Amino acid sequence: MSPVDGTLSIGKRRTRRRDSESVPAYPLPGFRPFQLCTLTDHIPVGGDWLFEMKFDGYRAQAAISGSNVVVYTRNGHDWTRQFKVILPPLQRLTKGSVLIDGEIVSIDSQGRTNFSMLKTGIAAGLPLKFYAFDLLELDGQDLSNQPLLERKERLESLLGARRPDDSLQFSSHIVDQGKMVFDAMCEGGHEGVIAKRADSSYVGDRNGSWRKIKCTKRQEFVVGGYRPSDTGHGMASL
């Protein structure tokens, strides 16, 4: 082997060693209790609130360490196998570790999230999307006490540019202008909006800093009478 060949070989070995030393091996983040929304009819006003689309899907956490990914349900169950169709982009996302909060959805032909389609899609292995809206941990650093707006900015930077057909998406938001966002969601036939305090920390509980406002509201009716069912069980009509 010539001196040049030897030098190149040594250089390659050193490069590989430096690369491996420059990427620490972070442990897989564990499950955390979810931040929960408070249902309300009132749309908060002011620049200290941001507004996101309310999805009709499964809330999920994606715990990632390199190519190792675990998907947790709202109750902390491991549903990685059930949501395997969304794993490839998560496995390529980082060489470090992250814990992402988001929602897994199925999109219908009208561009709306559809829970019935989601249940069918999970069973049939059909395409699904994971909309990421919060970053709880990054490379071993707990971000839960940082303001939500900062966490979302770091999440958007981590995800980078996304094509519309990508199965991993960033859940965008608008600061203030809640009434405008809500009206647009309802006119488009969507579920509603989620209002979040821009400076809120992630406490894993229901504390009023996240609020959901639905487009469809329940109505109460007075029952004037009913006809018993011929089978003897329940009612035939009201």
Image (spheres, grey):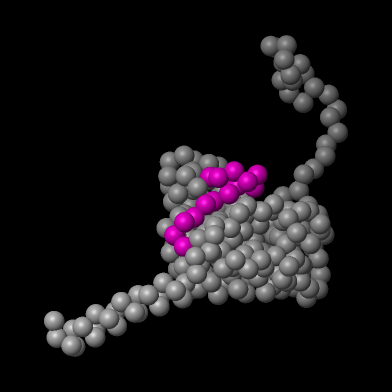
Q: Which residue lies furthest to the left in this view?
A: 1
Q: Is residue 58 visible?
A: no
Q: Considering only vertical position in the picture, is 167 above or below 75?
A: below
Q: Is residue 185 magenta?
A: no
Please identify the residue farthest to the bottom as the structure is shown: 4
Q: Where is residue 235 in the image (x, y as percent from the top left)?
A: 74, 20
In the image, what residue occupies the spot 69% across and 57% down?
A: 192
Q: Going 59% across and 43% down the picture, which residue do you hit?
A: 77
Q: Quadrant of residue 184?
A: bottom right
Left or right: residue 129 versus residue 10 is: right
Q: Which residue is drawn at 54% across and 57% down?
A: 28
Q: Position of residue 97 (x, y in %)?
A: 54, 64
Q: Can residue 114 be seen in this view?
A: yes
Q: Nearer the viewer, residue 229 or 170?
A: 170
Would residue 88 be found to the left or right of residue 7 on screen?
A: right
Between 137 and 217, the one lying in front of the other is 137
Tally of marks: 0
Percent coordinates x, y for residue 126 in the rendering: 43, 47
Quadrant of the frame with the C terminus:
top right
**Above or below, comparing residue 30 to residue 144 in the picture:** above
Residue extent of the magenta highlight: 66-79
Q: Quadrant of residue 237?
A: top right
Q: Which residue is drawn at 53% across and 41% down?
A: 119
The image position of residue 94, as x and y in percent, is 48, 67
Q: Determine the image quadrant of residue 215.
A: bottom right
Q: Is residue 71 magenta?
A: yes
The image shows residue 176, relative to residue 217, as above or below, that is below
44 or 125: which is nearer to us? 125
Closer-to-camera residue (6/159): 6
Quarter that holds the N terminus: bottom left
